[in-house]
Amino acid sequence: MAGTTLQMIIRSLFLAGLLLSSGLPFAYAQQEALPTSEVAPGIFVHAGATELMTKENEGAIANVGFVIGRDAVAVIDTGGSVREGERLLAAIRERTDKPIRYVINTHAHPDHVFGNAAFDGNGIRFVGHKNLPQALAVRGAFYIDAFRRIMGTDLIDKVRTVKPTLLVDGTLALDLGQRTLILRAWPTAHSDSDLTVLDEQTGTLFGGDLVFLAHIPVVDGSIRGWLKVIGELAALPAQRVVPGHGPVSNWPTALLDERHYLEKLAADIRALVAQGRPIRSAADTAAISERSRWKLFDDYNARNATAAFSEIEWE
Amino acid sequence: MLARYSRLLLLAGLMTVTPIGASSIQAATADSYDPWPGLVQDIFNNRPIDEGTGIVAIEMPYRAEDAAIVPVTLRITLSPADNRRVVAITLVIDQNPAPMAARFELGQDSSVSEISTRVRVNNYTDVHAVAELSDGKLYMTKTYVKASGGCSAPAAKNAEEAKARLGQIRFRQFAKPTDGPQNGTREAQIMIGHPNNSGLQMDQLTRLYIPAFFINELRIWQDDALVLAMQGGISISEDPNIRFAYVPHGAKRIRVEAKDTEGHLFQGEWPVENSGI
């Protein structure tokens, strides 16, 4: 422990020396901007890696983005570490000087909210589903501890839970100046705090983790609720979707693979429950036929099957 | 005795609550610190515990896929030639905020040979099963479980639905397993709709901890003979689910009674299917 602290002090002194010698005016290093692409006029997205959060990828596994209006900017998800959040901030500052008015969190999972602290302050309003404060309160400390083990103290010590102050129950319109974002809070599906953001002007939908492509969908709410929500989501008037994970895609065809997986998982589990098989049997067998269609299948399918079993057995 | 266990089931958790800022110390020490000797003292009063291979077995997945729902099976492997019987099995999840997950008491005449339930697993941890035999001796077996990754958390997924299910009891009987360890063995399952709140979660608005609210007592009888009793703690998953193998002795009815920490009483009674076998 003492050794670690000493190393940290030495490293800090070393970094301070570098900063002084490079003549930066501030006592912190400017982060390198996160690469983003303009998927529609004024809408920028960083494509997350289809991986688990690690020290190496700095937690940058989810798609994060921002929308620039005439007067202001809205950020949609902040990434899996404060460093990713700072790099997103740097990317915004490369594109515009307009003030950031809103940070919208599509739900409470760490790969979407761990960058929040990079934006806290300066009157920026944090926006989320009406269940988001409770979800963050219940899970926040657990996530921080769990990811400190995985990603290390350097990346995780700065992570803080930032409480949303503007909550969405039903729908909410945010005006960025000649550009309106329609936020919609959904019933429990991927999680219990799922929120989508629709840019009416370009027909671009930020689906959060209600929409997965390539990355296996992760069930942390209700598989039955999610299948129901997919039906309603498909009716949203969008041209394209920025999913929580996977490539920006056409709407609503982007939902097909995900719906297929969730329906297969639910059907397999209904059969196991009907046969009287125990919950542990679900992990090895349910939706196994989907294995070749998804990345990270072995990391999440057993978990999805376990969670879905505990829900479907109550039908 | 009951009061003593209840305290262990709950207070051990509350005492380890730390503000977020201090939790790094806890995390840094969790992996190297072995809480087992202290748990032997707290839960088993420092009684000697022998190696339990050939008496009790524990099965869990090596990785806790979903931190909120980790299946665990306790199996009695005591030889029929042994003239003792297993009186109780205690399940201990060493690194959880409340390590004593449950104590199962086995009815004298029901020959319970297997108990499965689901638990929350917060961290990389040893999980111990300690069997108490009719001669008073304790025997221990253990397994190791890796914590889950990703966005899995030992928390409610759908709080509204959990509330709506509160107090529902479902009973299910399964076909006689072909590989049952004893002739005439049957399997049955009790599900109780209950959030089984841990009490370790803070209400964002009031800044107060949401009080612990969980099933602390469950009893299952065939007619008037006890099959199984459980004293449960906050490590038992939401909607407690107990599946067990037993030998019916011709009883006509299965009866279940559960109590939670707010004093609610949940009861149910069902006819035994094919009770003649």
Image (tube, coloured by chain):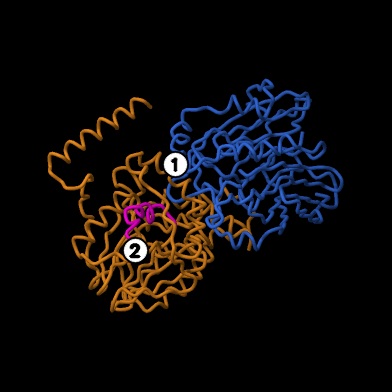
| Secondary structure category for the residue under label 1 | helix
How many angstroms separate mark 1 from mark 2 (CA)? 27 Å
Residue A72, position as x, y percentages in the image: 28, 70
- The image position of residue A151, as x and y in percent, is 35, 42
Colour representing chain B: blue
Residue B21, label in figure: 1
Q: Residue farthest to the left? A: A22
Find residue A20 and name its label: none
Using the image as rendered, state which of residue B184 and residue A50 is in the foreground.
A50
Q: Is residue A205 left or right of residue A144?
A: left
Q: Colour of chain A?
A: orange
A28 relative to A179, above or below: above
Instruction: Determine the chain carrying the residue at label 2.
Output: A
Q: Nearer the viewer, residue B238 or A306?
A: B238
The residue depicted at 42 percent of the width and 78 percent of the height is A235
Q: Which residues are magenta?
A: A108-123
